[in-house]
């Protein structure tokens, strides 16, 4: 048995949109050498609700990466999801920070 450890670092992408389409986008993106989790989520907010996905990345000890590499990968995948799911914004929640990306004009 082999036992390997890596420092914990996670990033989760939260975005509204179709689960099946999000899976398709992730499958294509992961062909370059990546593994993610894809889970359905429901966003409930003032005046409404919508379904979407949570896409998770971890520091996988078999192929360890630095926090900046994981976050950079999450950001690139988040932009791909935002474009291909036709969304205006996406959030990335990492171990040490939360990033909101938006096509909307700044207020």
Image: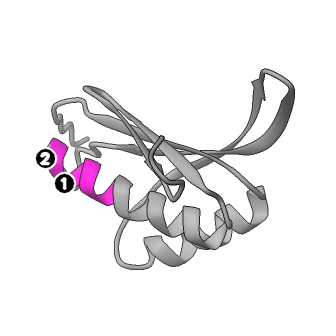
The percent position of residue 46, horizontal first and vertical second, equals 79, 21
The residue under the point 24% across, 29% down is: 8
Q: Which mark is residue 15?
A: none
In front of the other: 77 or 102 = 102
User: Magenta span covers which residues?
Assistant: 67-73
Within-10-Å neighbours for mark 1: few <14, some 14–19, many 20+? few
In front of the other: 17 or 105 = 105
Query: Hey, which residue is sitting farthest top in the picture?
Result: 46
The residue under the point 36% across, 78% down is: 32
Does residue 13 lie above or below 7 as drawn? below
Residue identified by numbered label 2: 66
- Magenta part, dominant SS: helix
The residue under the point 62% across, 72% down is: 84
The percent position of residue 64, horizontal first and vertical second, equals 18, 50
The percent position of residue 42, horizontal first and vertical second, equals 77, 33
Indicate the quadrant containing the N terminus: top left, top right, bottom left or bottom right: top left
Residue identified by numbered label 1: 69
Q: On the rendered structure, is 62 left or right of 85?
A: left
The percent position of residue 11, horizontal first and vertical second, equals 37, 39
Q: Secondary structure at mark 2?
A: loop
């Amino acid at each position: 048995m082999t036992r390997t450890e890596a420092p914990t670092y996670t990033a989760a992408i939260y975005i509204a949109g179709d689960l099946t389409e999000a899976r398709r986008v992730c499958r294509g993106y992961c062909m370059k050498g990546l593994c993610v989790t894809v889970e359905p989520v429901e966003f409930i907010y003032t005046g409404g609700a919508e379904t979407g996905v949570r896409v998770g990345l971890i520091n996988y000890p078999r192929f360890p990466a630095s926090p900046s590499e994981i976050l950079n990968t999450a950001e690139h995948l988040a932009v791909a999801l935002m474009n291909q799911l036709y969304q205006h914004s996406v959030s990335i929640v990492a171990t040490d920070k939360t990033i909101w990306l938006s096509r909307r004009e700044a207020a």
